[in-house]
Image: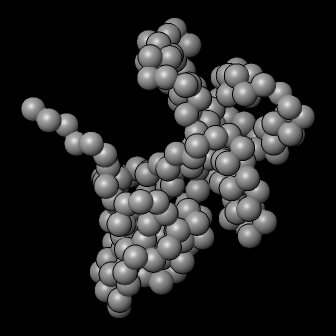
Amino acid sequence: MASPVKLAHIVLRTNRLQEMTDWYLHVLEGRVAFANDMLAFMTYDDEHHRVAFIATGASEQPTDAHTGMHHMAFTYASLGDLLDNYKRLKADGVQPFWSINHGPTMSMYYRDPDGNQIELQIDSFATEEETQAFFESDAFVANPIGVDFVPEELIARFEAGEPLAELVKRP
């Protein structure tokens, strides 16, 4: 049996087509691949569309009690890229509601205009083997969620030249 080679795209229902499109374009530094009054497709890389929106008129915000998607995550190439994006978004008034060192990832969670949770992250380990070893560790079993961090404190440590291995190490 063959597994997929990648996750192609995510489609969200909304009653705020333009606002949602604009927010994702801004947060992900993307571009519109196609848009009309009912649909919008956007991308930020070589995929023809990564995030799409359908204008359904749906107006209920997601809650912790609803079934369906909890969040979607986007991985950055480096901690510097993630932190630069954080600073760019913060300057525009877009701030994470949660910043956490999960162990396998350093993650910042945002809410889009419809209330969907968006995780912007980096991988903390260089290899799949290192990540798997962490998943199997006593530290992960004891705390599979992670430890919160303050972005400004992480930025200060990063800009002071602290080694990446120390910056991403879960306390």
Q: Position of residue 27 (x, y in %)?
A: 59, 64
Would residue 63 be seen by someone viewing this image from the given angle? yes
User: Of residues 47 and 15, which is closer to you in this image?
Assistant: 47
- Extreme top residue here? 138
> How is colour applied across the structure in the image?
one colour
Q: In this picture, is 139 found above or below 15?
A: above
- Extreme bottom residue here? 37
User: Of residues 72 and 158, which is closer to you in this image?
Assistant: 158
Give the quadrant of the C terminus: top right
Q: Position of residue 143 (x, y in %)?
A: 54, 21
Give the quadrant of the N terminus: top left
Would residue 55 be seen by someone viewing this image from the given angle? no
Q: In this picture, is 55 found above or below 127?
A: below
Residue occupying image coordinates x 72% and y 28% = 164
Q: Is residue 79 toward the left or the right of residue 125 in the image?
A: right
Residue occupying image coordinates x 35% and y 89% = 36
Q: In this picture, is 15 found above or below 119?
A: below
Residue occupying image coordinates x 57% and y 46% = 76
The number of discs equals 0
Q: For residue 53, which quarter of the picture? A: bottom left
- Extreme right residue here? 160
